[in-house]
Image: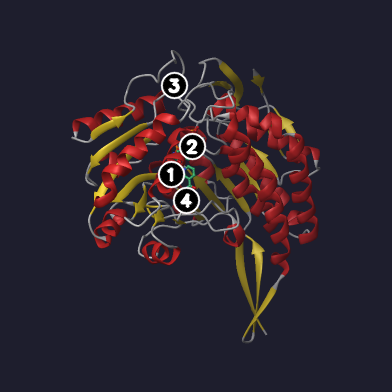
Amino acid sequence: MRTYDKFYINGQWVDPAGQGTGDVTNPATGAISAQVPLGNVEDVDAAVAAAKGAFPTWSRTSAAERESFLRQLAAESEKRNADLTQTILDELGMPIQHAAAFQVDPLEIICNSFADKAKQMEAEEQVGNSIVIKEPIGVCAMINPWNYPIWQMIGKVAPAIAAGCTMVVKAASQTPSHLFIFAEMCDAVGLPAGVFNIVHGSGKDIGPRLSSHPDVDLVSFTGSTAAGIQVSHAAAPTVKRVFLELGGKSPYIITEEADLKAAIDFGINDIMVNTGQTCNALTRMIVQESVYDEAVDLAKAKAESLVVGDPSDPDVFVGPMASEGQKQTVIDYINKGIAEGARLVTGGTHMPEGLTQGHYVAPTVFAEVTNDMTIAQEEIFGPVLPLIRYSTIDEAIEIANDTPYGLAAAVWAGDQDEAIAIAKRIRAGQCAINGGEANHEAPFGGYKESGNGREFGEAGLHEYCELKAMQL
Ligand code: NAP
């Protein structure tokens, strides 16, 4: 069991003011895998004060210096890769075949990506009689979810370091350990005191203080739309910048000319990875009616071929849900789908075969789903795929856009040009074309209730900048 009893604030491991301790449960076994301190608003205030104190000096460091720290963190992440991967297995339950590639390896990739971009902070643009420069926005509060904890954390921290910001970071209660390890990494590379600080505690207790703190200039939040709205309310009186990366209900249009087997395999892999706990998962498969029945059969066969079980087994593709509460939420949605008349094709509410403990849900496919059903409208956050039938492409696009969300989408059509033409009509921040893979250099973020920010790539750096125009 991992045990932490201090926060990393102002370059020191300090005793928390908060008195409580939080247990983290391994979702595959039910055992306690970590114990962490639970902070309070005094801890938040101490961390923000440290970040504020460090900002004047850190913000004036050269881009080359900040680039060097990011390169050192990238190198350090290789040393800590095994520890970090283990935290993902123990706290999230993501299978070993995905944990390093999807959760931990991006740490090195993203640090190097923003190391490359740090020099952009020193670029000057001449606009008429003005010189326009970028400056770091200031003290940043970063609040992260449990489903891609390391990827989300570094998608905020690396650009903030590159820009010259200082920060206070909070991880989700379910997945805290990586943040303590990352603080050890910052300490190991000698990042100046106060640049990177951590606090931990329940979001409901310390989140409002992080969001509303008058000395915080920007809050970057990734999580549910409901909590994102609360963050916005809390932040509003101080007019700080608020970036929200929220939930999704992403459509995947498959036309009759698509390579159907490849398209279905892509879609099933996408929804089942991380047991459906992926914000941009393709959670509504919208299939042309002439190939719909065949698509349902292919989806069933593919879902049933995936190995479910112990995340440490290299053959396992689908691990447990991250928590008992999340499992119950998913089961409730499956029951709702059945009650509203969708046809359960495979999976369901029973424990997957051969498993007796852990928060498991079998890969589940529903057919005959209409877009007004609850399972087509709400974010389930589990291994549950509804297949929706369409007749014309206009109808498919109408269905795709008929949700409050707009995080991601996918199209598989007969050729790339046709797929791109369809993608341009979908209101979403990302779209996979005929099986296109994720790209860490492309902007990531949502339309509508999926958020208002863009992380990663150049857009990710710009989130942490102010623009200054100097008239000559
Ligand atoms: P969540 O319940 O909203 O929690 C996210 C974070 O916010 C956690 O650290 C949580 O702390 C904290 N929090 C809770 N209430 C808060 C409040 N009132 N003020 C400030 N912070 C608060 O979301 P989750 O269940 O961890 O994550 C799943 C959601 O995140 C899904 O909707 C998913 O789609 C979304 N997500 C979006 C993206 C994206 O980039 N768009 C990426 C990943 C996930 P505690 O853990 O201590 O409660």
Task: Give the residue pinned by disc 1.
Answer: 281
Q: CA distance from mark 4 to mark 1?
A: 18 Å
Dot 3 or dot 2: first in sequence order is 2
Residue at disc 4, CB closer than 8 Å to ligand 1: yes
Residue, far top: 356
Kindly identify the amino acid type of the residue bearing the numbered disc 2: Val
472 in relation to 99, above or below: below
Dot 2 or dot 1: first in sequence order is 2
Kindly identify the amino acid type of the residue bearing the numbered disc 4: Leu
- Mark 3 Cα shell of 10 Å, populated few (<14), some (14-19), many (≥20): many
Tell me the element at label 1: loop
Foreground mark, 3 or 2?
A: 2
Task: Give the residue pinned by disc 3.
Answer: 359
Pick whichever, 124 or 60, lies toward us. 124
Dot 4 or dot 3: first in sequence order is 4
Residue 273's tag is 2
Q: Are marks 3 and 2 in contact (CB under 8 Å)?
A: no
Tell me if 74 is positioned left or right of 278 in this view: right
Task: Give the residue pinned by disc 4.
Answer: 244
Q: Residue at x 69, y 49 (%)?
A: 111
Q: CA distance from mark 3 to mark 2?
A: 16 Å
Q: Are marks 2 and 1 in contact (CB under 8 Å)?
A: yes
Kindly identify the amino acid type of the residue bearing the numbered disc 1: Ala
- Residue 370: x %, y % from top left: 22, 45
- Residue 393: x %, y % from top left: 28, 61
